[in-house]
């Protein structure tokens, strides 16, 4: 793998995870405003499946395990901060 293609892969992974963080923030906001329990459970289940898929793709692409855990930590911290403000 060339160094340039590695940088492009890293950029794509970071922008993909930024999208995941934005979706998670909107999911938390929706949970705070909605009274529909079934729809919320389905949204959370779909979100977990999407995270699992992204994790598997990054593993196959050969990304560093430490980098994957850091991104997951950022996601968890973002969710905790969002939940505490709602």
Image (cartoon, rainbow, N blue to C red):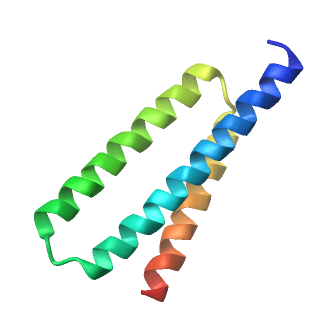
Say left or right for 29 vs 8. left
Is residue 22 shown above or below 8?
below
Say left or right for 20 vs 42. right
Is residue 63 shown above or below 11?
above
| Residue located farthest toward the bottom when viewing the structure as drawn | 85
- Residue at the image position 42 percent from the left and 67 percent from the top: 26
How far across and how far down the image is residue 38, in percent?
11, 62
Q: Nearer the viewer, residue 63 or 20?
A: 20
Say left or right for 5 vs 40. right
Q: Nearer the viewer, residue 18 or 49?
A: 18
Quadrant for the C terminus in the image:
bottom left
How far across and how far down the image is residue 21, in percent?
53, 58
Quadrant for the N terminus in the image:
top right
How far across and how far down the image is residue 69, in percent?
61, 47
Q: Nearer the viewer, residue 26 or 86?
A: 26
Is residue 55 shown above or below 26?
above
Query: What is the tally of numbered marks visible in this picture?
Result: 0
Say left or right for 36 vs 10. left
Q: Quadrant of residue 14?
A: top right
- Residue at the image position 59 percent from the left and 43 percent from the top: 16
- Residue at the image position 73 percent from the left and 34 percent from the top: 10
How far across and how far down the image is residue 55, in percent?
50, 35
| Residue located farthest toward the top when viewing the structure as drawn | 1
- Residue at the image position 29 percent from the left and 56 percent from the top: 44
Q: Quadrant of residue 74?
A: bottom right
């Amino acid at each position: 793998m060339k160094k340039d293609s590695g940088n492009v892969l890293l950029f794509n992974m970071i922008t993909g995870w930024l999208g995941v963080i934005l979706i998670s923030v909107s999911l938390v906001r929706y949970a705070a405003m909605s009274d529909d329990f079934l729809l919320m459970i389905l949204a959370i289940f779909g979100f977990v499946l999407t995270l699992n898929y992204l994790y598997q793709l990054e593993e196959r692409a050969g990304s560093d395990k430490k980098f994957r855990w850091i991104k997951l930590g950022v996601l968890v911290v973002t969710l905790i901060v969002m939940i505490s403000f709602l």
